């Protein structure tokens, strides 16, 4: 009995160690996700590139949505200001969806997202002549993961210099 | 490319109308019919003749292997092991000793003969009912030797039709998108192959993204989406000549194309200002008609086989659901009301069912429902699968499935799968590369 108990305890300790070491990485990911998503909208900066200092190139969306968040609107206002300062630059707005939808619907959804960004830029004085919309649907993810964080990075509209 | 090679087909002996063996294909394949496919017999001179041209040691065995493989993968038949066969192929073709075939529990027997005549391939075959000790069918074909695989498929179709009472689907091709490279930068090409995976051929080079190819009713043209010059537009490709042309050159993205059942129109979506509506284009006079007009996303249109109705998916209710309307866009009715999202509706060639993709609680399903939305039946569940396409007889669905990646984002794959309407007989279709967006042709020899 006693021996049994000791053995059991050692086993417990051993498994605990294993769990802990596994936990160390798991926990990191967990806080990561918390810090990088609000609802299911990506709020991190992992994949973000910059058109100019303080001008992020992309905005993120909730699942199946094309509504711009407060943060997205801020990003787009910065883009609009930068575009006004650089009147010779035209842009392509590339709309994307995550992999959790049918291909054809996602093509339409990507187009709708890029257009939401386009409309916002236009209300801040950017002529539609300077903006081209291009949807990639689920065809060009930035993160190849099959998890909520990866999907949140992929639901995006990216402003790309066209010239 | 589609060799319109003359296949002479004549009936050797009138088919007797009396009902012999029958296979019920409306139920699952719980008891596939045991049958024996005796290798087609061949005389030494013919064997040598074909060996020289086709580089196949015994073309008779090769053709019977195709028949055997087709019948097995249908899930309805159980071809018996050739090692157990007691009667030699040449003698069996003249007059089977039914007791011998009965002994190995074969209920049906296929025999035949191959000849090399005037540089042509002549094949005759017979289907026998072992229990009734009767011939059910006898046919002969003459064609160019290169057509030998098609002969195997045509024999399979004839046997399938005689035993099930419905047309087969073996002499058909699949057009699909071949995929290679990392998930974030996939290289995609149009590819075409025989229904059994043979004769795979790439139709585009992979320089631009291509998606969703679909055959016209004659299976000689394909409509698809190409990102040529970074402008996603609907294109038309003539498989025989290789000619490509843009048909959806609208001021924005055109996508989700399909042919009308008469082949004269293409129906597709056009996305502009965040809305996607359904349009048709007449291929002869290029007249464009707007079919839906709604601020929502309307896409994945598919005609009913009589051309009078269109099914499509729309998120006008707030979520992606399936609708049916008249071909002029009037009388729009939502037909999907179950839990979850519904997409990619495709009308069965028989007209009675609509196949779809369903997303519910993080799982993807391929299912079917009646055209009024009743009788929903889910055939298969997986992490990700979509885009069903019907076999020309409306008995089998082909679709593609993607795998979940691991925590490092590795292990992605996309493959073609098929499943019977009964929900049984799920099979992966082997392709040289990863594959998606399959579309099944019509029966080539009709």
Image: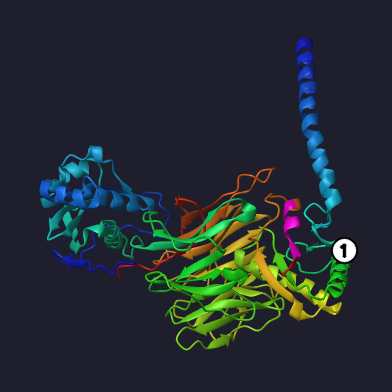
Secondary element at tag 1: helix
Vertical order, A131 against B70 (above or below): below
| B144 left or right of A109 in image | left
The answer to whether residue A140 of the structure is visible from this angle is yes
The picture places residue B62, in percent across and down from the top left corner, at: 26, 49
Q: Position of residue B271 (x, y in %)?
A: 65, 76
With respect to residue B294, does B95 lie above or below?
above
Q: Position of residue B254 (x, y in %)?
A: 59, 75
| Image point (88%, 71%), residue name | A81
Q: Is residue B399 magenta?
A: no
Q: Is residue B145 left or right of residue A60?
A: left
Q: Residue at x 86, y 77 (%)?
A: A124
Look at mark 1 in the image and give the residue it sits on. A71
Identify the chain of the residue marked 1, using the numbered disc in the image: A
Q: Please state, as top left, top right, bottom left or bottom right, where the C terminus of chain B lies in the image.
A: bottom left
**Quarter of the image containing the N terminus of chain B?**
bottom left
Q: Nearer the viewer, residue A86 or B292?
A: A86
**Location of residue B382 in the rendering, given as x and y in whole percent from the top left corner:** 59, 52
Q: Residues within 10 Å of mark 1 (few under 14, many from 20)?
A: few
Q: Nearer the viewer, residue B24 or B418?
A: B418
Q: Which residues are magenta?
A: A150-159
The front one of A54 and B397 is A54
Judge whether residue A156 is colored magenta: yes
Q: How many marks?
A: 1
Q: Quadrant of residue B82?
A: top left
Residue B131 appearing in the image: no
Residue drawn at 47 percent across, 59 percent down: B398
């Amino acid at each position: 009995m006693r021996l049994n108990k000791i053995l059991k305890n050692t086993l417990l300790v051993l498994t605990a160690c294993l769990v802990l070491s596994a936990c160390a990485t798991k926990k990191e990911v967990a806080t990561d996700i918390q810090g990088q998503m609000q609802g299911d909208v990506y709020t991190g900066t992992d994949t973000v590139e910059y058109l100019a200092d303080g001008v992020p190139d992309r905005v993120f969306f909730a699942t199946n949505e094309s509504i711009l968040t407060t943060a997205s609107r801020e990003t787009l206002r910065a883009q609009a200001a930068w575009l006004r300062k650089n009147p010779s630059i035209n842009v392509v707005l590339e709309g994307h969806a995550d992999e959790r939808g049918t291909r054809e619907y996602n093509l339409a959804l990507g187009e709708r997202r890029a257009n939401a960004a386009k409309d916002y830029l236009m209300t801040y004085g950017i002529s539609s002549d300077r903006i081209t919309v291009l949807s990639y649907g689920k065809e060009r993810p930035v993160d190849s993961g099959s998890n909520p964080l990866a999907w949140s990075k992929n639901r995006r509209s990216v402003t790309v210099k066209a010239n | 490319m589609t060799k319109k090679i003359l296949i002479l087909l004549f009936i050797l002996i009138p088919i007797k109308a009396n009902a012999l063996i029958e296979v019920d294909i409306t139920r699952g394949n719980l008891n596939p019919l045991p049958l024996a496919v005796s290798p087609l017999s061949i005389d030494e001179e013919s064997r040598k003749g074909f060996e020289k041209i086709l580089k196949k040691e015994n073309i008779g065995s090769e053709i019977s292997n195709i028949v055997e493989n087709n019948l097995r993968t249908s899930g309805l038949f159980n071809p018996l092991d050739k090692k157990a066969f007691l009667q030699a192929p040449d003698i069996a073709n003249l007059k089977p000793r039914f007791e011998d075939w009965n002994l190995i529990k074969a209920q049906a027997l296929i025999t035949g003969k191959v000849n090399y005549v005037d540089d042509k391939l002549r094949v005759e075959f017979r289907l026998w009912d072992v229990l009734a000790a009767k011939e059910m069918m006898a046919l002969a074909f003459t064609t160019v030797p290169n057509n030998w695989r098609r002969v195997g498929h045509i024999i399979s179709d004839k046997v399938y039709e005689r035993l099930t009472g419905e047309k087969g689907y073996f002499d058909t091709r699949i057009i699909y998108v071949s995929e290679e490279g990392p998930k974030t930068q996939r290289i995609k090409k149009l590819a075409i192959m025989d229904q059994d995976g043979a004769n795979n051929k790439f139709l585009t080079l992979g320089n631009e993204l291509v998606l969703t190819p679909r055959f016209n009713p004659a299976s000689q043209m394909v409509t698809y989406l190409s990102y040529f010059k970074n402008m996603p537009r609907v294109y038309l490709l003539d498989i025989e000549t290789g000619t490509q042309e843009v048909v959806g050159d609208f001021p924005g993205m055109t996508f989700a194309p399909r042919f009308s059942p008469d082949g004269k129109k293409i129906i597709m979506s056009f996305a502009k200002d965040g809305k996607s509506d359904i349009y048709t284009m007449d291929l002869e006079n290029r007249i464009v008609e707007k079919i839906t007009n709604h601020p929502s996303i309307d896409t994945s249109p598919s005609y009913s086989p009589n051309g009078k109705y269109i099914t499509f998916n729309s998120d006008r209710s707030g979520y992606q659901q399936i609708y049916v309307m008249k071909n002029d866009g009037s009388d729009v009715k939502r037909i999907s009301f179950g839990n979850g999202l519904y997409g990619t509706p495709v009308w069965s060639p028989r007209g009675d069912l609509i196949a779809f993709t369903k997303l519910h609680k993080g799982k993807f399903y391929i299912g079917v429902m009646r055209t009024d939305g009743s009788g929903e039946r889910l055939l298969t569940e997986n992490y990700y699968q979509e885009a069903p396409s019907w076999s020309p007889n409306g008995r089998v669905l082909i679709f593609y499935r993607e795998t979940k990646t691991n925590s490092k984002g590795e292990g992605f794959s996309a493959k073609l799968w098929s499943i019977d309407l009964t929900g049984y007989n799920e099979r992966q279709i082997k392709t040289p590369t990863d594959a998606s967006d399959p579309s099944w042709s019509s029966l080539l020899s009709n």
